[in-house]
Image (spheres, rainbow, N blue to C red):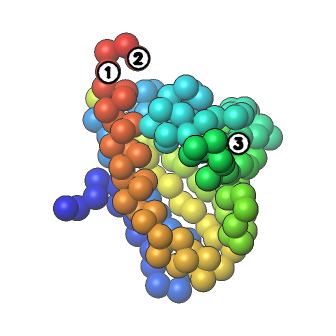
């Protein structure tokens, strides 16, 4: 089964590109990355902090049986509503160094939109290490949840 969220990684480059088209208006797609309650739902994580301003910070944490199993944080470098978010991403308690993420939001029509992410890694080896994990499948599943959650009439 082909994933709806596409991940492209060119051989020998320190970056990867992620694209996904959503059956959601642009403002609603952007809200899914801006609203802490919605982020928590589709990512399945606890949003500790999400300061959507230039120089704001963010922190997410996922627990299982009372133990933290995933923690990540970063700084928001650029935040332009309905257009773009530029941020750092650091996965805590791993040897992965900080990465730089560019999220671009685009309206395709009144009811559809597209997310394009460019992620830059310190080395090709760290990028390739991430790609060995079920990263693409997990992200596509999370984006599927995002689509379903935001199609609910309450939002």
Q: Is residue 6 above or below residue 83?
A: below
Q: Are marks 2 and 1 in contact (CB under 8 Å)?
A: yes
* Quadrant of residue 46 within the rendered picture: top right
Q: In which quarter of the image is the N terminus?
A: bottom left
Report the residue marked by disc 3.
59
Task: Name the outermost residue toward the top.
Answer: 154
Mark 3 surroundings within 10 Å by alpha-carbon count, few (fewer than 14), some (14 through 19), many (20 or more): some
Helix, strand or loop at label 1? It is loop
- In terms of depth relative to the viewer, which is nearer, 153 or 29? 153
Residue 112's spot in the image, x, y percent?
A: 30, 35
Task: Name the outermost residue toward the right.
Answer: 55
Q: Earlier in the sequence, mark 3 or mark 2?
A: 3
Disc 1 versus disc 3: distance between alpha carbons?
A: 26 Å
Report the residue marked by disc 1.
152
Residue displayed at 37% across by 27% down: 150
Count of numbered circles in the view = 3
Residue displayed at 45% across by 37% down: 42
Q: Which of marks 1 and 3 is nearer the N terminus?
A: 3
* Quadrant of residue 93 within the rendered picture: bottom right
Task: Name the outermost residue toward the left.
Answer: 1
Q: Quadrant of the C terminus?
A: top left
Report the residue marked by disc 2.
155
Q: In this view, does 54 lie above or below 100?
A: above
């Amino acid at each position: 089964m082909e994933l709806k969220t596409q991940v492209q990684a060119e051989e020998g480059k320190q970056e990867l590109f992620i694209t996904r088209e959503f059956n959601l208006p642009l403002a609603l797609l952007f809200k899914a990355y801006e609203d802490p309650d919605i982020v928590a739902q589709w990512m399945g994580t606890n949003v500790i902090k999400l300061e959507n301003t230039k120089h704001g910070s963010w922190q997410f944490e996922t627990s299982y049986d009372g133990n933290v199993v995933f923690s990540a944080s970063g700084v928001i470098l650029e935040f332009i509503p309905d257009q773009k978010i530029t941020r750092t991403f650091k996965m805590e308690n791993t040897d992965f160094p900080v990465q730089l993420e560019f999220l671009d939001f685009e309206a395709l029509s009144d009811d559809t939109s597209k997310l394009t992410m460019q992620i830059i890694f310190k080395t090709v080896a760290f990028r390739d290490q991430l790609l060995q994990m079920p990263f693409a499948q997990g992200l596509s599943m999370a984006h599927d949840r995002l689509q379903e959650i935001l199609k609910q009439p309450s939002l």
